Image: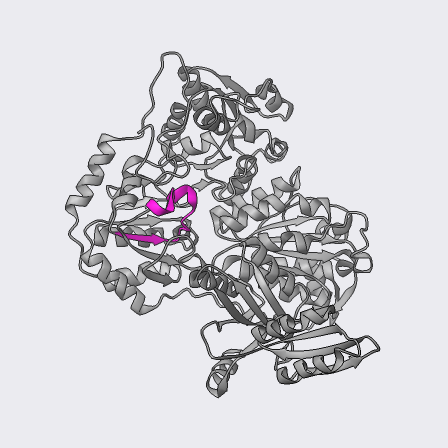
Amino acid sequence: MKGILSLTVNNRPGVLNRITNLFTKRNYNIESMTVGPSEQDGISRMTFVVDVDDEAVIEQITKQLNKQIDVLKVYDITNQSIVARELALIKILVTTQTRAEIYSVIEPFRASVIDVSKDSLTVQITGESDKIEAFIELIKPYGIKELARTGTAAIPRGMQIAHAKSATIV
Amino acid sequence: MTQKSVVADRKSGKTHYSGAEFLLDALKKENVEVIFGYPGGSVLPIYDKLYSSELFHILTRHEQGAIHAAEGYARITGKPGVVIVTSGPGATNIVTGLADAMIDSLPLVVISGQVATSVIGSDAFQEADVLGITTPITKHNYQVRKPEDLPRIIKEAFYIASSGRPGPVLIDIPKDMAIIQGESTDKEPEMDLPGYQPTTKPNYLQIRKLVEAVSGAKRPVILAGAGVLHAKASHLLKEYVEQQGIPVVHTLLGLGGFPAEHPLFIGMGGMHGCYAANMALSKCDLLINIGARFDDRLTGNLAKFAQHATVAHIDIDPAEIGKNVQTKIPVVGSAKEALAELIEQNGKKPEIDVWTTQLTAWNEEFPLRYTHEEGVLKPQRVIQMLHEKTNGEAIVTTDVGQHQMWAAQYYPFNKPNSWVTSGGLGTMGFGLPSALGAQLANPKATVLSISGDGGFQMCLQELSVIAEMNLPIKIIIVNNGALGMVRQWQELFHDNRFSHSIFQSHPDFVKLADAYGIPGYKVTTEEEASNCLDAALKTDGPVLIDFRVKQNENVFPMVAQGKGLDEMEGV
């Protein structure tokens, strides 16, 4: 099963190393991770997507992460209502014959063209992981020259949980 | 500048101090009694300040000796053992000790020198990525980037190392950070640890659940681990056990937490535990784990472990609960607070006479035993004699292997803080230096450093420190001319193919002791052993005794790897 963990951590040198090291040490596999500043100065938010056997493993990962001195909070948001997004940049081969057709694929996905050259288009797409997978599958036959994907960034939906969160992060 | 002049300068209004001065000042404020260390290039500025400070420093002969000594000190006192080593090889030499302290939850504050910030990352002379290397084996680590941060970092380090589940904290100090001056605010440094709030007080509802489970249990057993010792809760464990009449099994590291002579003590459980203890763990209907982490050497095959039991687990580290064994009643908190609350609740005592009678009967029917052979010195007998001659009052430190298991089996401990062994990491070479630390922690105690002939040779250089300080440690070598436990496994599981486990030659340990200025004896019979021990214990200084014991003696009973605790061999 897939688990999604959202962490707030002190933005200090070595913190990322300590956390990824923990995954290695405990033999947990990270499917994707993102790190970036949070709404508070000096505090970063990390989102981990992990592929594990069962919920007990996610619980154990959560507990181990919580033991880290520089980890402020860990939220297991696997079963919560969340907003999750990732970004992909895809450079697609185009010819005069395929150009129009590719545009017609891009549009329903609400992807946008961010760079155009004589024989390629670079497309930016954001969304949940599944949507990006689907888009890549559709576009593959035209020829993908280069592809870069971020990991998933996620936060719980709505005011209620957001409140609970800001109250616990101090 | 001396520590005195630092204080004087503060009064006179001086506000700038070097990192080394900040460091030593902060160590003094933590009431550090002894520092174990080894100087080198990157820590020269610190050692220069140490020269004129009042801090007591012991120069061990190897950094590994320093950190194991600090572990011995920490095990006995409960206070962080302090270590200073230089960058690169100095720091990599303490890696084993850090891993050992991490897994056995011993508080340490370790200062490692580092090359100057200007050359970090350039593969400079004696540079190693110490933060990277030690991250998985420390509770926390720091690299100092401003000298004025040191007072806060030291304060945090001591707090982190000794609170919650204890563990080692490393502080990496680049050479220039020890030299350059930082401004002192002269205020008490404020800790900045928003993500670290260990829970010591257990949840009331979970305690209630446990009280109810106990009152309804037919076959309850307490599994007491080192958490009881770390929390200094031995007296509360005894009080609770006597209140409820529940039998106790100890883990290897927990020995001494509950009196071995108590009628409700069943014995040590695990791979080389006694039959009754392992049957208690197998057949119980309620298992109350207090401060043990369900190590595989204790549980045997997990699928067969405590199959019919409701498991309650009291642990200060929430991540230990449910890690290896599914837990019905999780209690996050210190053993001390949890036991105090359980005693306070004074729940209905369970009716378990049949169960306790059965356990006692098993102990009588299947005691720990070995066969006497005329004219042969048996290692078990050596340990028994050590127990008799010291009235069971000594602090015992060991290496790892057969002698360690015999010591655990045949030296019953009645008091806490008398057993120092490397449980989780199983570190050979641990015994002699940890004895050094234990003796300094408790100068009046009789300290027995028990090693095998293999482990003894891994850190024997610390004989030099023991001789220099004339510490009255009795150094016992249980010498069977082999790596005993390896030999035993090869006999049992590898068709007697003794691949590199039998030593072809040894130094003369008596002459070796003599070279260090320590009286040494070789004994080969029980009578010699008895006389020699009497003489050694009367000697006011170190003595080394080389006990020549039977080579192919095995440790029994035993639960083979992969077997359940109720499938013991050699009972």
User: In which quadrant of the rendered image does the N terminus of chain B lie?
Assistant: bottom right
Q: Point out the residue furthest to the bottom here.
A: A159
Confirm whether residue B471 shows in the render.
yes
Residue found 66% across the figure and 85% down from its top: A107
Q: Count how many numbered circles sit on residues in the image.
A: 0
Residue at 69% from the left image edge and 56% from the top image edge: B172
The magenta segment is B286-304
Residue B252, visible in the rendered structure: no
Q: Which colour scheme is used?
A: one colour
Nearest the camera: A129 or B215? A129
Any magenta on residue B494?
A: no
Residue A53 percent coordinates (x, y): 46, 59
Up/down of B518 relative to B140, above or below: above
* Horizontal arrangement in the rendering, residue B238 relative to residue A68 (left or right): left
Between B433 and B466, the one lying in front of the other is B433
Compared across the picture, whether B260 is left or right of A118 comes to left
Q: Taking B534 as reference, is B326 above or below it?
A: below
Q: Which image quarter: residue B467?
A: top right
- Locate residue B440: give its quadrant: top right
Q: Which residue shows up at 31% across the image and 44% down it?
A: B249
Residue at the front extreme of this rendering? A97
* Residue B535, image x, y percentages: 46, 22
Residue closer to the observer: A137 or B41: A137
The picture places residue A66, in percent across and down from the top left corner, at 51, 65
